[in-house]
């Protein structure tokens, strides 16, 4: 195949191109020189030698600003997302059944009154717990709801923090040492009529069993007067538990308990123990029924959601045996049928 002869570039065109390149280089050098010579406020002020300037505080983690996420525009966007894509995702993956929502009827507002803020305290086994809680909490509390989220996970980058704040109305909360700033912010929001979802366990279960409750929700309830609503979520740990790379669709249950407040003179520690016991009873109710769970509670035989004090393999085996009692999570999977030989 014959090659086409190369067409020589005219000398005039080459000269024009060379002049354009030289002109661009001179302009670039001139701009750089101007920027280098410019002083404050176009550049940061110079620092004398021997002076150490303290680092600017990070705007990530517990310092992430989420106030903008409660503006009217952000609220409208979040309402559309919650009732649309988020609800479709939850029902497609978790297929929830909600029980006990009628126990909140006495706290629903009448006429033009604002809803009394509540503090919802579910157990925590999966990242699905938050969207499941948001879509299961009844109106009008769902309309004005914030979620306390781990600052070190959900707000570790600008992108993740912005998405969590906009889609979930999440607040950064330090799990290691709850700072005064976070508590004051949550207290102010509750005073403004916002309800709260907060996980007393502090983080997702590492092995499918429950964990000890921390006293943050009890303290907030005692300080603000907002009642605690115990919640139990069953099945999310088996669908998308900690360490799983992808969700495995199944069924879930969300059980609401009756709102509770601290008794007069009751300490935060004792109130926290009552909250943990109420959630344990709801866990028993999710596996049995209301009457059986209350009978077990009266006899002091409510199953411990934290599991037995065994080695890890026995805890796993016991958890699998317990899951066979219900109809959620792994229990919806097809049972293996061994061939007859």
Image (cartoon, helix red, strand yellow):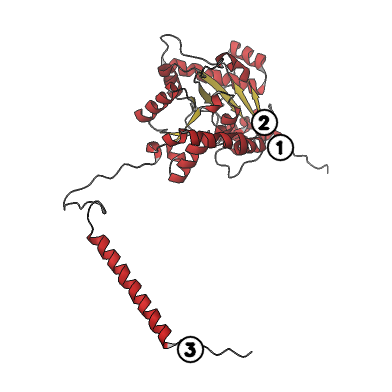
Quadrant including the C terminus = top right
Judging depth in this view, the residue of 69 and 173 nearest the camera is 69
Judging depth in this view, the residue of 194 and 202 nearest the camera is 194
Query: Which residue is label 3 attached to?
Result: 8
- The alpha-carbon separation of the residues under discs 2 and 3 comes to 77 Å
Instruction: Say whether disc 2 or disc 1 marks the residue closer to the N-terminus.
Output: 2
Label ID, residue 308:
none
Q: Position of residue 28 (x, y in %)?
A: 32, 68
Judging depth in this view, the residue of 271 and 162 nearest the camera is 162
The residue lying at 66 percent from left, 23 percent from top is 287
State the SS at label 2. loop
- Circle nearer the viewer, 2 or 3: 3
Residue 188 in the figure: left or right of residue 136: left
Q: Position of residue 95 (x, y in %)?
A: 67, 33
Badge 1 density bin: few <14, some 14–19, many ≥20, Cα 10 Å:
few
Q: Which residue sits furthest top?
A: 264
Are circles 2 and 1 on residues that touch, CB within 8 Å?
A: no
Query: Which residue is label 2 attached to?
Result: 328
In this orientation, does residue 132 appear? yes
Q: Position of residue 205 (x, y in %)?
A: 53, 33
Label ID, residue 333:
1
The residue lying at 41 percent from left, 88 percent from top is 11
Q: Which residue sits furthest right?
A: 341
Instruction: Say whether disc 2 or disc 3 marks the residue closer to the N-terminus.
Output: 3
Residue 158 in the figure: left or right of residue 298: left
- Circle nearer the viewer, 1 or 3: 3
């Amino acid at each position: 195949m014959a090659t086409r002869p190369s067409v020589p570039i005219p000398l005039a065109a080459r000269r024009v191109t060379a002049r354009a390149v030289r002109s661009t280089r001179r302009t670039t050098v001139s701009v750089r020189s101007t920027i280098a010579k410019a002083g404050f406020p176009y550049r940061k002020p110079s620092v004398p030698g021997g002076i150490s300037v303290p680092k600017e505080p990070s705007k990530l983690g517990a310092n992430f600003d989420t106030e903008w996420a409660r503006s009217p525009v952000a609220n409208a966007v979040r309402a559309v997302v919650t009732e649309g894509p988020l609800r479709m995702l939850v029902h497609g993956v978790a297929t929830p059944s909600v029980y006990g929502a009628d126990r909140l009827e006495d706290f629903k507002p009448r006429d033009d009154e604002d809803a009394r803020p509540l503090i919802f305290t579910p157990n925590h086994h999966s990242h699905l717990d938050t969207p499941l809680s948001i879509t299961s909490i009844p109106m009008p509390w769902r309309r004005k709801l914030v979620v306390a989220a781990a600052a070190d996970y959900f707000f570790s980058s600008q992108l993740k923090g912005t998405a969590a704040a906009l889609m979930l109305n999440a607040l950064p909360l330090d799990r290691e040492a709850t700072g005064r700033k976070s508590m004051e912010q949550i207290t102010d929001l509750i005073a403004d009529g916002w309800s709260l979802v907060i996980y007393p366990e502090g983080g997702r279960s590492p092995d499918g069993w429950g964990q000890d409750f921390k006293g943050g929700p009890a303290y907030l309830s005692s300080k603000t007067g907002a009642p605690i609503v115990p919640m139990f979520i069953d099945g999310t740990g088996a669908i998308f538990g900690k360490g799983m790379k992808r969700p495995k669709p199944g069924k879930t249950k969300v059980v609401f308990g009756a709102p509770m407040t601290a008794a007069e003179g009751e300490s935060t520690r004792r109130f926290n123990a009552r909250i943990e016991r109420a959630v344990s009873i709801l866990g028993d109710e999710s596996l049995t029924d209301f009457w059986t769970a209350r009978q077990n509670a009266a006899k002091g035989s409510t199953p411990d959601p934290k599991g037995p004090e065994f080695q890890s393999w026995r805890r796993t085996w016991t958890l699998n045996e317990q899951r066979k009692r219900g109809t959620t999570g792994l229990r919806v999977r097809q049972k293996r049928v061994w061939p007859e030989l």
